[in-house]
Amino acid sequence: MVVYKICLKVIRLAYLAFDLMLKICYNCLDNKKVYLARVGFPTLDFLMGGVIVNKKELMKKLVKMCDESARSLDYELVDVEYVKESGSYYLRVYIDKKAGITLDDCQSMSELLGEKLDKEDPIENAYYLEVSSPGLDRPLKNDRDLKRNLGKDIEISLYKPLENKKKFEGNLKFFTEDKIVIKINDDEMEIPRDAISVIKLALKF
């Protein structure tokens, strides 16, 4: 029991030192698009590698918070990603609007969302918050993405060949729950959605 208590004290001291380092880094950041935040003191389950929050439930909460923040600023929430890369966690938020997203828009969203995240504390570890526009090469993942890009040229990649091809490019005409319809030259082609691995905007140079 004594050894157990000593170990917890050592862990707590190490964590407090790490927390101080994060605060110093946070205050030194000049780029308003990136926020580094530490959330709460870890529980014993967290220190021992246990699972604290169900990933799906966490993502639901994060998407809701991001959507509320975006709507309040008249932006559209395009996507939310929470990933671990090179040992660090990143919460990436993609927003859009008709006139296009500027750096000032990203800063406004970062500040508003950052305050909400600090207040509600939904994430159990330190992470970077990044806010940006979607980018032309971002996959079209849902109906909202497809609706936004109706009438535009898209590129579709398939899991398996269809008519001896795994990639098709055409104008997005319409879509349903089960299929995507594109126009290739003068012909329309229906592609089952469950056969599609990735949909992206076709980049023209």
Image (cartoon, rainbow, N blue to C red):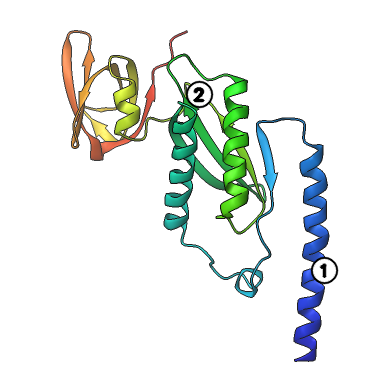
Amino acid type shown at disc 2: Gly
**Can residue 167 be seen in the rendering of this structure?**
no
Q: Quadrant of the N terminus?
A: bottom right
**Can residue 94 be seen in the rendering of this structure?**
yes
**Residue at (55% x, 39% y) in the render:** 92
Left or right: 162, with 169 as reference point: left
**Residue at (48% x, 47% y) in the render:** 62
Q: Residue 191, labelled with which disc?
A: none
**Residue at (46% x, 28% y) in the render:** 138
Above or below — where is 120 with respect to 156?
A: below
Above or below — where is 61 with respect to 34?
A: below
Percent of width and height locating residue 106: 59, 27
Q: Residue 13, labelled with which disc?
A: 1
| Residue in front for this viewpoint, 75 or 147 | 75
Residue 57 image-quadrant placement: bottom left
Q: Residues within 10 Å of mark 1 (few under 14, many from 20)?
A: few
Amino acid type shown at disc 1: Leu
**Residue at (42% x, 50% y) in the render:** 60
